[in-house]
Image: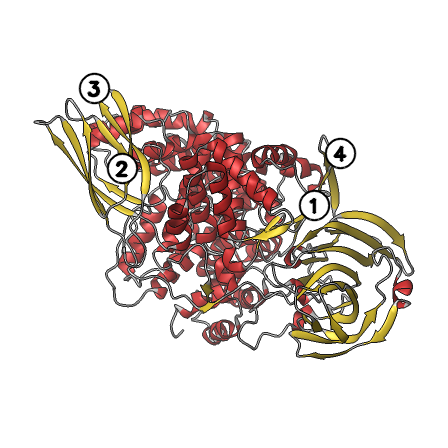
Amino acid sequence: MGRYTLYGRYRRYHNNAGVVYSCQESSRSRENPADLIFYLSKRTKNTNKNILTYIHTIILKRDVTSHDRGLFLGRLIFVICTALLLFSVPSQAAEVADTLRRRNPGTVSSQGAYRPERPRKSDILYTRLDVAFDWEKQQVPASAVLMFKPHFYPQNILELDAKGFDIKGIALMDTVGDYGSLSTEEIQGKVKKKLEYSYDKRKLLIKLDQSYTRKDTVFVKIDYIARPNDVPRDKPGDSASDKGLYFINADGMDEGKPKQIWTQGETEGSSCWFPTIDAPNQKFTQDIYITVDSTYKTLSNGLLVAQNEGKNGLRTDHWKQTLPHAPYLTMLAVGDFVVAKDMMPNGLELSYYVEPKYGQDAHAIFGRTPEMMGFFANVFGIEYPWEKYAQIAVRDFVAGAMENTTATVHEEGVQNDARSLVDGNSDAVIAHELAHHWFGDYVTAEEWGQLPLNESFANYSEYLWSEYNNGKYEADWQNLQEMKAYLAESETKQVPMIRYFYKDRENMFDSHSYAKGGRILHMLRNYVGDDAFFASLQHYLKSHAFGTAEIDDLRMSFEKVTGEDLNWFFDQWFHKPGHPNIKIQQEYAAATGKVLLKLKQTQDTLATTVYRLPLKVDVWVNGKKSQYNVLVDKVNQTLEFPAAKKPDLVVFDAEAQLLGVVEHEKNRREMEFQYTHSDRFLHKYEALASLEGNLTDTLARAILVKAMTDPFWKFRQMAISNFSEYDGDGFADIEKVIQSAARQDAHPQVRSEAMITLASFGDNNSDSIFREALSDSSYQVVSVAIEKYLMAQPTDANEIAAQFENSPNDAIVTSVGNYYAGLAQPERFDWFLDKMKAMKPTEKYNFLQVFGKYLIKSKQDVQRKSIPVLEGLARENPSYFVRFGAFQALGLLTDIQGVAALRKDIRAKETEPKLKEMYSQFGDL
């Protein structure tokens, strides 16, 4: 599942996550700028000066890409002001560093309580649900038939999770009959006797008519009304926000937003809408009967086996899943959708549910799914194991995406028109959720502390797909972003991957379980080799098919295949916190003809461990490479390699596979050699990054000029960005190269970066390029072009703004809004509101920054009109970062009486844990 957390709750991201503080770091990563503030709020309490320096570092250090450094920086003007408020406290040894040079936090995060696997007193084998919907009350009148048996010991009580229900009655049922095919009247005829129960709005304890043994199979029927808006939240262990089932625009009053219903079960949300044993170690088959208005489409797990028209314009759809899965993977969705379909060669149906306006784009969005499925089936060694595969995009989803068995739910941002997809698709999150159908759905982590068995594999599957589909450099660029995400988190949180102790199961959805886990699997693949790696995965999947697993099961599969004891690997990477920090001192001993690498593992070896690291070292002498296998396994260690003369370059971790921090100083000449001769993405990236801010150096400048035409787009973009505001030697020729890139580069992020850099020259030599780019195929390029062209205040500025003010692309509208904000015309107020209302959450956050600029420049009567609008967004918008953006905008209006008190009240009544934590950093308002 992809999550919007520091890492993503992506990844549920989306689009699946990128660098933790990046707005648009890659084609798949469109993180929200609020995460920058949240990240900074989790970091050490820096002074105002250091915060500004840190933000400057983030934005200018290539951790933020083309559009970010122009639009992102401009639109974050009062995000930075917020940061200044957040961190107006004494400095505590703040440290500004490149993201790959993280310091050890010195302590490991507190553990929390012991969290065993849920005891299995009874096993639910089958669930039938009959559900209808009361849109006005936002309730679910329903009945559930559960088939269960005692796991081992005799039982006379069935204990179920059922949160916030009105229980209408419970009965013992006849054990004879196919409950999946019976009508509700026929089911009622199967009632044997009513059963007594006790219920505290969380746990439902059903007193059975006798004690049953593990040889018995028992059926019970529960009639109830689920009230997802009334789930209890006042005791420890209660979720702060999960409802399980969500009514979207239930009263239809929100124009432009469709009425929908959808569910989200992970981690324990399913028991908010049907009674079950809500634990990942339960597995059952199911039938779900969904009664809806006949104008709506439904989706659920398994196959749609029947549709029956009823009275009063209603229809009942019967969805049947014959293969067992965990309760958190049960889903349904209801709404007005267009369905596009593909078919696998074996006849398996793939379907894509989108809003009607995206119907013609459904295949462009999801159309690589068939190839992905074939690819994963091949590398995992197991055919896709389920009855069908559907994907659906819904509004206001509380996660980026969710891998419900046979029916993945995506947030609305996955929906884009074909032109938007020029700037990047959602392949990463699509691959992530599809891979879960092997790792998570087919074989499920037995307890939430074992979550990396689900999420680390899904995360690494993004890499596998990118490597296959886009090439190794693109995959390695993604790999670097993931490593940065983990390293950012590691500054304040270092915990074992597998956690038997934690405070909240939701805390498992972090950059450890996702990003770090994916990088660990990459190292394991590198160590055992591709054949053994994928053979081991196949063994693991086959051994635990439709069952559950823990980390030792994975280890034993690898040991069975490779014939090697791998306790050392799993212990240091999965059971110990942290990562290696290695400092290298390089020396050349001419007398002995050897190059020496003096290594020191500087991590806290008491809190973590001394790592055992088998890796390779490249030694280049006279332009020729020699590669050596080494084993690093001591705190202090010296490696020696033959070298007839002082090496051109020494590369530690030659395969660029190590998760950790390596400090190995190299001079400018060595970095030039590394960029020119290495064939590894990370080594080239490191070399280019080291040249930043050194344009007065002839050699550095020559390397960057060369990199502006590198075959890989990211290196071209990095090089071009380094020439921002340049006016030194060779300027005319450099400007021509960048102008050519702005016009002709194949990658939209490079074209965008080129225009941003050209605009920084301030010489008006590129105004015609900005004008031409208004018709670029890329929305991203057009949005940058609009901003840069209008910045020069041409005579046709108003005409150009009017031409694009109703663009279907939010980034373009935001660029126009930035221009209108500068004009501060009162008559534009309604335009701002109309555009903001229709935007997707991330774009709405960005647009709020522009709206804030408009309000600052406007008169107080306009400012007053905005207060109820911003209050509504700050209190009620489903997206926490939109709420945060509106809260920020209100902070610009505190000179108006009552606004300061309003902000205090908004903060006091916020329930989202992440946003509450962000607000807590403000101190007294």
Residue 688 location in percent, x, y? 30, 34
Residue type at mark 3 is: Asn
Residue 850 location in percent, x, y? 48, 53
Report whether 311 appears left or right of 406. Answer: right
Residue 354: give its label. Answer: 1
Q: Which of marks 4 and 1 is in front?
A: 4
Name the element at disc 4: loop
What is the tally of numbered marks visible in this picture?
4
Q: Give the residue number, with chain letter if any, for mark 4.
A: 347
Q: Give the residue number, with chain letter if any, for mark 2.
A: 690
Residue count near mark 3 (Cα–Cα under 10 Å), binned few <14, some 14–19, many ≥20: few
CA gap, disc 4 and disc 2: 52 Å
Residue type at mark 4 is: Gly
Residue ranking furthest to the left: 591
CA gap, disc 2 and disc 1: 45 Å
Above/below status of 275 relative to 821: below
Name the element at disc 3: loop
Residue type at mark 2 is: Ser
Q: Which is more N-terminal, label 1 or label 4?
A: 4
Q: Which is more N-terminal, label 1 or label 2?
A: 1
Q: Which is more N-terminal, label 2 or label 3?
A: 3
Residue 617 location in percent, x, y? 28, 32
Q: Which of 193 and 595 is in front in this view?
A: 193
Q: Are marks 4 and 1 in contact (CB under 8 Å)?
A: no
Q: Are marks 4 and 2 in contact (CB under 8 Å)?
A: no
